[in-house]
Image (cartoon, rainbow, N blue to C red):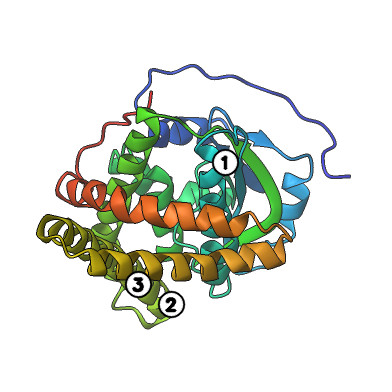
Amino acid sequence: MLFRSYKTEVITITNNGKANAIHTGMQYVPEDTDFVITCDSDTEFDKNFVKNALKRFYPSVGAVVGEVKIKNTTGFNNIFDVVYYYSFNVWRASMSYFGHVSVLSGACTMMRYNVAKSVMGDYVKRNIRIGEDRYLTYLILKEGWETVFAPNAIAYTESPTGMKFIKQQLRWYRSFWDGVVYSRDLYFDRMFIPYTIDTLIQVFSRMFAVLLWFAIIVSVYLGLWNVIALISVSLIVSSSVRGLYGAIVEEDSSFIPKMILWGFVSVIFTPPLHMYALFTRKNGNWLTR
């Protein structure tokens, strides 16, 4: 029997960021607790989330992240849900192989209580307002614990739409660049070679997207339509290859056209956001409330 008894206690505090809320909540957790779960205000858990997450807690594992799926898959979110899929089932799954998942999603993460408690002091000290899940992951990894992905531990979240979606992406991009800076002490540790390689790949891919964006702008301005055609064909081919994985594994051919559409969106619209996020990474505004 997983639970013998439970009680719910609601704690009301002034809104001072999620990190502060988690730190406050941890103070009310009984000392004999084995595991704690952090989530977002709109998170809905699959009934087997806890059971499936617990299966991934080998002795070396300090925290487990589940798979987040979008609840409101209408309109543009019908395309963006494949981005969530690849973010968890490809990126986090591959980094989980090395025990170095670099972002334990704030929407659904289970941690050992003693691990979470050991990093709470440093966690709240930085007073981080955005990307608190990335920073918490960094602290857990720094303590020598592994962070892994549980593909069958499912949670659902609402994805913002319209301008709130753009603001959410900006917040995530700021969190990424901030993480690249504050986790630099891990790059020179042999134990974190996979983590370092993953970070370098992500930085390179974002910088390449920015260069490609400039190439598109210049080509349009100069009327180099053959270059635009070459970039478009390359995007279609590369996005189709990425989409093929989901199409085969999930037996859903819609992954391919969705990834093609997202490929064009990510090349045209996300590079300017990344550039702005890089130079404003210290801006801690949540933006989507």
> Is residue 89 at least partly visible in the picture?
yes
Judge from the rendering whether residue 103 lies leftward or rightward of residue 245; answer left or right: left
Q: Please state which of the two labelled residues, at mark 3 or mark 2, is closer to the viewer.
A: 3
Q: Please state which of the two labelled residues, at mark 1 or mark 3, is closer to the viewer.
A: 1
* Mark 3 residue type: Ile
- Compared to residue 285, the image places residue 236 above or below, namely below
Residue at the location (14% across, 49% down)?
Answer: 279
Report the residue marked by disc 2.
Answer: 194
Residue at the location (38% across, 71% down)?
Answer: 234
Element assignment for label 3: helix
- Depth check: give the residue in front, 204 or 136: 204
Report the residue marked by disc 1.
Answer: 78
* Mark 2 residue type: Pro
Work out whether mark 2 precedes mark 1 in sequence or the reverse, and give the earlier one.
Answer: 1
Work out whether mark 1 precedes mark 3 in sequence or the reverse, and give the earlier one.
Answer: 1
Element assignment for label 2: helix
Work out whether mark 3 precedes mark 2 in sequence or the reverse, and give the earlier one.
Answer: 2
Residue at the location (83% across, 44% down)?
Answer: 2
How dense is the environment of label 2, judged by Cα within 10 Å: few (below 14), some, or many (20 and up)? some
Q: Are marks 1 and 3 in contact (CB under 8 Å)?
A: no
- Depth check: give the residue in front, 188 or 34: 188
Q: Please state which of the two labelled residues, at mark 2 or mark 1, is closer to the viewer.
A: 1
- The CA distance from mark 1 to mark 3 is 27 Å
Report the residue marked by disc 3.
Answer: 201
Furthest-bottom residue in this view: 190
> Is residue 143 at least partly visible in the picture?
no
- The CA distance from mark 3 to mark 2 is 11 Å
Element assignment for label 1: helix
- Compared to residue 155, the image places residue 53 above or below, namely below
Query: Splitting the image into 4 quarters, where does residue 218 fall?
Result: bottom left
Image coordinates for residue 101, horizontal then vertical, percent: 50, 63
